[in-house]
Amino acid sequence: MTNIFTTIFVQLSELGNFWQKKYSRQLFLLSLTFILVQSVLIFIYLDKLPPELPLFYSRPWGKDQLASPRYLFLLPATSVAILFINLFFITFLAKLTLLSVSLLISSSLYSFLSFYALLKIINLVS
C-alpha cells in the first residue's frame, strides 16, 4: 500500500516539475487560446452564415460535404478532446520530457489547424 502512494507522489512531483517549465505552460495556453478564439468566432458568425456550408472535405464533392453551421462547434470540441487526452497521457509520461512536449506541440498544432480551417470556411462563405 505504501508503494502505491509513493509511486503516485513521485508521478505528481514529476508532473509538477513538467508544468513549472515555461514552454509547457506556453504551449498549453496557446492551445487554449486557439480553442477560445474559435469558439468566439463561431458565436460571432453563427447568425451570418448560410444554412449549409462546406465542412466535411474528406467526403465526395457535393452535398455530402455540406453541414449546418452548428457543426462548426466540432472544431473546437475536437481540439479540447485532443488537448485533454494528451494531458491525460502527460500525467503518466511527465518523466519523458520529449514525449510530453511533443504531445503538447501536437495539441497546439491541431488547435491551430482547426482554427485555420474555421477561418477558411468563414472566409469562403462570407
Image: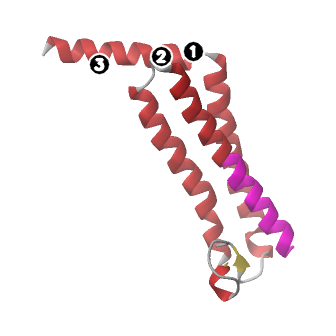
Residue 8: which numbered mark, if any?
3
- Tag 3 secondary structure: helix
Query: Counting residues from the N terminus, which is met first, the one under dot 1 or under dot 3?
Result: 3
**Residue 52, quarter of the rendered image:** bottom right
Which segment is the magenta one? 111-126
Look at the image and tell me in which quarter the C terminus lies. bottom right
Which x, y percent locates residue 7? 27, 15
Residue position for label 2: 16
Give the CA separation, mark 1 to mark 2: 6 Å
Q: Amino acid at mark 2?
A: Gly
Say if mark 1 contacts mark 2, CB within 8 Å. yes
**Residue 76, quarter of the rendered image:** bottom right
Residue at left offset 66%, top offset 22%: 23
Asked if residue 87 lies left or right of residue 115, the reply is left
- Tag 1 secondary structure: loop
Q: Identify which residue, 47 or 85, lies in the foreground.
A: 85
Look at the image and tell me in which quarter the N terminus lies. top left
Q: Amino acid at mark 3?
A: Ile
